[in-house]
Image (cartoon, helix red, strand yellow):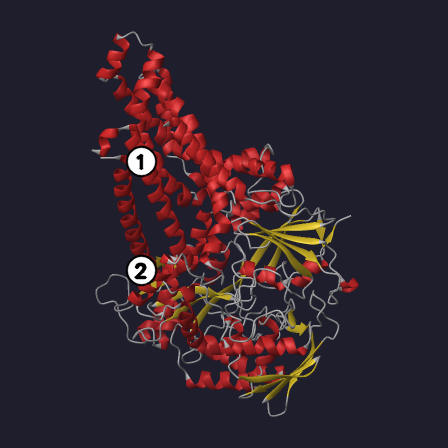
């Protein structure tokens, strides 16, 4: 199949997936136990006020009417208005998105920069001591509990040694270069935590696929032709071994945008994850739906990019 | 592909970095930094009701009265108030020297606008508390008159405490006030003006030059910054590191204990204005019987709950629905139910209950106790309550639920015994109606008692404190005698601040006012 056809096919599939995710989310949010009005009930609340608020939120209408109204607004790019903030959902999310992009983008970048050499190192020294260390570290890394790790890092590196700020995204009152320096300073610990939490899966996946690739005939052929082992690894085997890792990266992007909740909470980092966490507690349906739309779009786009990259790397998948 | 992945991460990071904008430079001479666990959700003070909302907007929008440490309401913006002889008119005089920060005078018109918007649009806390309101009129720039549908002695103190006043000239027309986000160009009249908001991070307020409610007409501190720390452990570390000066939210006992010994950190305490309790579902065939409720009331080890589950940070209300903190209203004769499982057994045996199958429990007396799982203190004392009931031969099954499910089950009255707490209950004549009147919004127990109703009506219709006191005390006694509500304790909240750097906080009761009330933050001074 031609690359354009392949792309259009994947795009159509992505749109259907997006609609499905939006629909499931809409009904799932409404299945959450509790009453959005009661979640923020004030001491003087009466049944009359509750009914007025349900009406203001549009929750007194039949579910299907709410659903089609929501789809209509969504098509026009309107994510609705937060129940609690009286602000458009897009505004609520856009205030947080840049911080999430910075944090997760940095984490993704670092994970790849560190993960690929570590995976290669472990694979090329399979069953050696380096490999053993990487594997043990990988298993430990996969079982790390983010809040405990976060508090430990804040206590030791923040409070005891004073190397890093205790939470936040930037020191207030700064301008110019010192502002950006402060942003980077505040970024280090939460970014490091996210990298630690996800590095293991990249390294272990890459290690396994690279070991397999290095045993393939095309690598033997390259060696027989006198190609240096270094070149066999980096030029021939790694290209194929990276395919599953690429898929993993695509899948992880969605997780990173929403899944940084714990990291953002511990480090008082003002991202989308925390907005989702707060919206769940307060049953703020529009913000929850908006955040899930954002996540669904992120995952669909990331997968589309991954599929296209896959198609470029391995033309066989376009067949 | 490696290059592509690196590029992907780089692009995402660059997008984030490029979208961030530097804050404006501030060169404050003194700034107090306060930690909160949650963001401000809504800057419209009539709508927002989270603690962070209240802490920030309280510094911007004045209330008419202020709470004393005894729980009574003193003049603040309002200087005097009262009711006509027939109780159908109420009046209030206010100060004449206040202005909004854009220079517009603060007048009685602002009060009329606010109360009319609140009642017309049924907004927030105040709307439910003033059903007797008919209309308001500014008879002069400093005097408001209210027309009431019936005598209501709680009306003025309810609007005085619960209703922040908003500027008529800067808010939208009535009909649109509830939907007004008020998220920029703030016009306020508190000791501080909001100057900078960074969602998810911090809120900066600057002292205004004309705030006549404190000595010298201006707050002693130049700036107040609220910084959001969703995790209370990280918040405590920030206080120790000197990044925070004060923690606004009350601290869990273990964290307060850790901070207690740290150099330069002081733990302040404030009593709650609410209480923790269990309610019995009166629609249940067994729980509707007085003897069963009496037996349950004597099956609770109150001292153990306060000493162990609450680690000593709780005081008895003498089983009364009026806490001793509200010293003017509280009945000094009230006495706590005794913990006496044998007495419980005797009451049940006398009422005809027996243990025919010999399993140690009276037949037919098995109840579920509903509580919020994430409320650690309640989860602890629910177990103590279960153990006490077992000794009395009553079987209790604990049902811990996620917060929203718990709230919904309470609202739907889907429980046998309901464990929980009320936050701020400061005006007995008003809250007795909400909690115990037939059909009251928080009458989760479905109590319906004509004698009680009569006393509540009498208390609410009285227009002087002296006339209110007798029926509210009688109502509280009736509630206690009939065991409609088993009030266990009122909590002592703990707050931590950097006492090396700051002095002069004014502590007010409840975790809502605590050290973070307008008077306190306008009075606090940097040391040296």
A40 left or right of B107 in image? left
In this view, which residue lies farthest toward the bottom? Answer: B86
A62 left or right of A183 in image? left
**B498, B345: nearer the viewer:** B498
**B295, A227: nearer the viewer:** A227
* Disc sitting over residue B9 in the figure: none
The answer to whether any part of residue B412 appears in the image is yes
Q: Chain of mark 1?
A: A
Classed neighbour count for the residue bearing mark 1: other residues with Cα under 10 Å, few (<14), some (14–19), many (≥20): many
Q: Are marks 2 and 1 in contact (CB under 8 Å)?
A: no
The answer to whether any part of residue A150 appears in the image is no
Residue at 39%, 49% (x, y): give it.
Answer: A294
Q: Nearer the viewer, mark 2 or mark 1?
A: 1
Residue A302, x across and y down, in percent: 35, 40
**B67, A217: nearer the viewer:** A217
Is residue B112 placed above or below B386 in the rendered structure? below
**Which image quadrant for residue A285?**
bottom left
Residue A234, x across and y down, in percent: 35, 18
Residue A77, x across and y down, in percent: 40, 56
Is residue B293 placed above or below B217 in the rendered structure? below
Q: Chain of mark 2?
A: A
Residue B449, x across and y down, in percent: 41, 83
Is residue A107 placed above or below B190 in the rendered structure? above
Residue at 44%, 34% (x, y): give it.
Answer: B9
| Residues at marks 2 and 1, CA–CA distance in whole angstroms | 36 Å
Is residue B503 placed above or below B115 in the rendered structure? above
Q: Which residue is denoted by mark 1 in the rendering?
A: A308
Label 2: which secondary element: helix
Residue at 33%, 11% (x, y): give it.
Answer: A229
Q: Which residue is denoted by mark 2 in the rendering?
A: A31
A239 left or right of B156 in image? left
**B88, B339: nearer the viewer:** B88
């Amino acid at each position: 199949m031609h690359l354009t056809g392949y792309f259009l096919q994947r795009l159509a599939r992505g749109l259907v997936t997006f609609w499905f995710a939006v629909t499931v989310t809409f009904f799932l949010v409404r299945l959450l136990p509790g009453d959005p009005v009661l979640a923020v009930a004030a001491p003087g609340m009466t049944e009359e006020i509750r009914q007025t608020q349900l009406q203001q939120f549009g929750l007194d209408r039949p579910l299907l009417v709410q659903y089609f109204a929501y789809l209509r607004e969504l098509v026009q790019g309107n994510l609705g208005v937060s129940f609690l903030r009286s602000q458009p959902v897009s505004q609520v999310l856009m205030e947080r998105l840049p911080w999430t992009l910075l944090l997760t983008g940095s984490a993704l970048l670092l994970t790849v920069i560190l993960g690929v050499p570590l995976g290669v190192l472990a694979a090329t020294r399979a069953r050696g001591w380096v490999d053993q260390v990487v594997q043990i570290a990988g298993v430990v890394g996969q079982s790390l509990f983010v809040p405990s790790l976060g508090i430990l890092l804040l206590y030791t590196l923040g409070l005891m040694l004073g190397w890093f700020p205790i939470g936040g995204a930037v020191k207030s009152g700064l301008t110019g270069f010192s502002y950006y320096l402060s942003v980077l300073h505040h970024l280090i610990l939460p970014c490091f935590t996210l990298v630690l939490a996800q590095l293991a899966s990249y390294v272990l996946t890459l290690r396994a696929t690279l070991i397999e690739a290095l045993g393939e005939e095309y690598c033997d052929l390259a060696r027989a032709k006198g190609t240096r082992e270094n070149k066999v690894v980096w030029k021939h085997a790694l290209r194929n071994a990276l395919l599953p890792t690429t898929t993993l990266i695509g899948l992880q992007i969605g997780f990173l945008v929403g899944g940084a909740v714990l990291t953002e909470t511990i480090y008082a980092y003002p991202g989308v994850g925390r907005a989702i966490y707060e919206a769940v507690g307060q049953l703020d349906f529009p913000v929850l739906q908006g955040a899930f739309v954002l996540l669904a779009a992120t995952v669909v786009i990331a997968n589309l990019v991954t599929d296209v990259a896959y198609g470029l790397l391995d033309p066989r998948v376009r067949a | 592909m490696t290059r592509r992945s690196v590029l992907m991460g780089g692009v995402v990071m660059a997008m984030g970095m490029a979208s961030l904008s530097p804050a404006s430079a501030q060169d404050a001479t003194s700034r107090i930094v306060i930690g909160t666990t949650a963001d401000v959700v809504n800057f419209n003070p009539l709508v927002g009701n989270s603690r962070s909302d209240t802490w920030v907007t309280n510094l911007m929008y004045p209330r008419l009265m202020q709470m004393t440490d005894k729980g009574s309401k003193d003049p603040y913006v309002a200087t005097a108030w009262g009711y006509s002889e027939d109780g159908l008119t109420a009046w209030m005089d206010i100060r004449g020297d206040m202005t909004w920060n854009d220079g517009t005078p603060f007048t009685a018109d602002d009060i009329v606008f606010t109360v009319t918007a609140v009642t017309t649009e049924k907004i927030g806390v105040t709307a439910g508390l003033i059903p007797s309101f008919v209309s308001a009129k500014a008879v002069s720039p400093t005097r408001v008159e209210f027309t009431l549908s019936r005598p209501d002695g709680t009306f003025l103190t309810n609007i005085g405490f619960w209703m922040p006043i908003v500027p008529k000239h800067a808010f939208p027309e009535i009909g649109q006030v509830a939907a007004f986000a008020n998220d920029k160009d703030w016009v306020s009249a508190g000791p501080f003006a909001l100057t900078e908001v960074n969602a998810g991070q911090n809120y900066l307020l600057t002292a205004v030059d004309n705030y006549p409610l404190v000595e010298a007409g201006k707050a002693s501190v130049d700036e107040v910054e609220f910084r959001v720390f969703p995790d209370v452990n990280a918040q405590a570390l920030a206080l120790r590191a000197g990044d925070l000066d004060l923690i606004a939210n009350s601290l869990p006992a273990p964290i307060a204990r850790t901070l207690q010994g740290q150099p330069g950190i002081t733990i302040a305490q404030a009593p709650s204005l609410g209480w923790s309790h269990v309610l019995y579902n009166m629609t249940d065939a067994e729980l509707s019987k007085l003897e069963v409720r009496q037996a349950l009331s004597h099956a609770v080890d109150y001292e153990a709950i306060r000493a162990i589950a609450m680690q000593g940070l709780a005081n008895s209300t003498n089983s009364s629905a009026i806490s001793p903190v509200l010293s003017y209203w509280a009945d000094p004769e009230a006495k706590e139910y005794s913990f006496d499982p044998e007495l419980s057994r005797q009451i049940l045996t006398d009422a005809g209950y027996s243990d025919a199958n010999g399993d140690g429990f009276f037949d037919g007396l098995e109840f579920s106790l509903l509580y919020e799982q994430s409320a650690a203190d309640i989860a602890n004392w629910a177990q103590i309550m279960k153990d006490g009931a077992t000794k009395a031969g009553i079987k209790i099954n604990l049902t811990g639920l996620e917060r929203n499910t718990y709230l919904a089950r309470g609202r739907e009255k889907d429980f046998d015994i309901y464990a929980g707490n009320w936050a701020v209950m400061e005006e007995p004549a008003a809250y007795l109606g909400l909690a115990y009147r037939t059909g009251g919004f928080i009458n989760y127990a479905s109590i319906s008692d004509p004698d009680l109703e009569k006393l509540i009506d009498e208390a609410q219709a009285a227009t002087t404190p002296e006339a209110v006191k007798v029926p509210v005390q009688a109502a509280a006694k009736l509630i206690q005698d009939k065991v409609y509500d088993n009030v266990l304790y009122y909590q002592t909240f703990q707050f931590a601040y950097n006492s090396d750097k700051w002095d002069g906080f004014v502590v007010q009761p409840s975790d809502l006012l605590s050290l973070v009330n307008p008077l306190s933050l306008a009075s606090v001074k940097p040391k040296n």
